[in-house]
Amino acid sequence: RKEVEQDPGPFNVPEGATVAFNCTYSNSASQSFFWYRQDCRKEPKLLMSVYSSGNEDGRFTAQLNRASQYISLLIRDSKLSDSATYLCVGVNSGYALNFGKGTSLLVTP
Amino acid sequence: NAGVTQTPKFQVLKTGQSMTLQCAQDMNHNSMYWYRQDPGMGLRLIYYSASEGTTDKGEVPNGYNVSRLNKREFSLRLESAAPSQTSVYFCASSENTFYPDSPLHFGNGTRLTVT
């Protein structure tokens, strides 16, 4: 079982919708998390870091729930350009990076 | 500022052939990594180098060797390619090894097919 699990989707949403992805992690010692975005046939790029208090960047909000061991990514007012795969990454106490398999998002006109 | 540069972008090998994937970063990062990405498997760490002069195995090191040539460059070598090594390979770098506040910066990837 992977340490970081994501719903692979795909999530199909209309433009302007709000969409949320969850990512669960099994290692309670995981210290921090990242969300990466990966466009088709491109490299992953850092979207945002997630710390204990969560994080917000424009239309994107990331939350961390340590009690239930999951993090979430909320995208408001979805744009066509948000279509991509979103990778959840956990960092445990050994500083090993654990990548989820990714959640696919398709925003349609 | 180029970031992380990988070469080649595409490669086709026959089973048993060898090749070296090159990676260079210009961000003065201490740590460098090689990942492979396969459908349904996500990103898996092959090898990493915490700092110049050190290398360590990751999750899937078998069939690969690496060299940290200097602070900028980290190469991945396939000595005898196998079809199971058909994948997309990403080089990445970070300021420090796996440090929580030190996210990875990825290269553009190398698409390798082994026939």
Image: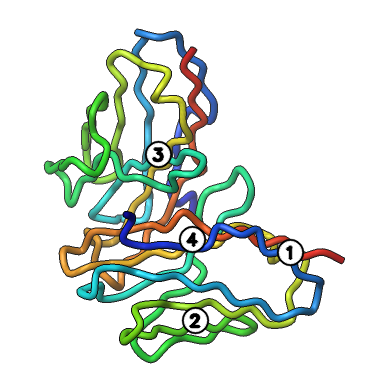
Provide the secondary structure element on which disc 1 rests: strand
On the same chain, marks 3 and 1? The answer is no
| Residue positioned 40% across, 77% down in the render | A70
The residue type indicated by label 4 comes to: Leu
On the same chain, marks 3 and 4? The answer is no
Q: Is residue A12 above or below residue B111?
A: below
Q: Are marks 1 and 4 in contact (CB under 8 Å)?
A: no
Density class for disc 4 (Cα within 10 Å; few <14, some 14-19, many ≥20) is many
Numbered mark located on residue A12 in the image: 1
Numbered mark located on residue B36 in the image: 3
Q: Nearer the viewer, residue A31 or B5?
A: A31
Where residue A80 sits in the image (x, y, percent)? 78, 65
Provide the chain ID for the residue under circle 4: A
Provide the secondary structure element on which disc 4 rests: strand
The residue tagged 4 is A87
Query: Given the current orientation, which residue lies at the most extreme left position?
Result: B53
Mark 3 to mark 4 CA distance (whole Å):
15 Å
Q: Is residue A107 above or below residue B9?
A: below
Provide the secondary structure element on which disc 3 rests: strand
Query: Given the current orientation, which residue lies at the most extreme right position?
Result: A109
**Earlier-in-chain disc, 4 versus 2:** 2
The residue tagged 2 is A62
Q: Are marks 3 and 2 in contact (CB under 8 Å)?
A: no
Closer to viewer: mark 3 or mark 1? 1
In this image, B4 relative to A67: left or right? right
On the same chain, marks 2 and 1? The answer is yes
Numbered mark located on residue B4 in the image: none
Mark 3 to mark 1 CA distance (whole Å):
27 Å
